[in-house]
Image: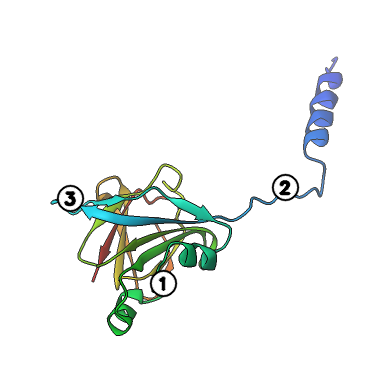
Amino acid sequence: MKRNTGVLLAVVGLTASVSPAGAARPAVPETHCVAHAVDQLPAGELLLSAEVCYPTFATAMAAEGVDAWGSNAAARVATIQAASFTIGTHYDGAGFSGSSTSVVGSNCNGGWLNVSATWNNRISSTINGCPRIRHFAGASLTGASESTYAPGGNLGGLNNQTSSIQYLT
């Protein structure tokens, strides 16, 4: 029985040259993006500004003029008379790690959004600015849902499966 070992060796050699053993993949730089809720439609959908991204979270909040962010930002707003606060920050890593996208608004009255194409099916954890944030598997608040409660947490069943989000008290 004759085997074509030349082809197998060529494929193994090609694989080894593309991804040598022990070589680390290049790190993707983190980005921390911010979009502002500029209006809300009668059905509750938030209209957002263009998303702007920065190399660090602190730089993003300062550059965007956000007065309060992080856990329970909505509760802190009353004490500092803030005009804007993060209603939610969503991360692509567990435990609030990796890149993030923050939504800045002025209330937690049930407004919702469809996540951008960049963030669709990418969210792993959320820091709540609002007391409750509901993540939905489908667009326009459809499909399975999972809530995070202040201060926030990791997603379980909807890890990397969020397509729309609602911000609630």
Which numbered disc, 2 or 1, marks the residue that appears first in the sequence? 2
Which numbered disc, 2 or 3, marks the residue that appears first in the sequence? 2
Secondary structure state at the residue bearing disc 2: loop
Pointer 2: residues within 10 angstroms few (<14), some, or many (20+)?
few
The residue where tag 1 is placed is 69
The span from disc 2 to disc 1 (Cα, nearest Å) is: 33 Å
The residue where tag 3 is placed is 41
The image shows residue 65 at horizontal and vertical percentages of: 41, 66
Which kind of residue does numbered mark 3 sit on?
Leu
Q: Nearer the viewer, mark 2 or mark 1?
A: 1
Pointer 3: residues within 10 angstroms few (<14), some, or many (20+)?
few
Which kind of residue does numbered mark 1 sit on?
Trp
- 54 or 75, which lies in front? 54
Tell me the quadrant of the picture where the N terminus can be found: top right
Secondary structure state at the residue bearing disc 3: loop
Residue 50 position (above or below residue 32): above
Q: Is residue 100 left or right of residue 137?
A: right
Task: Residue 119: tell me if it is visible.
Answer: yes
The residue where tag 2 is placed is 25
- 45 or 134, which lies in front? 45
- The answer to which quarter of the image holds residue 139 is top left
The span from disc 2 to disc 3 (Cα, nearest Å) is: 43 Å
Q: Residue at x 23, y 58 (%)?
A: 111
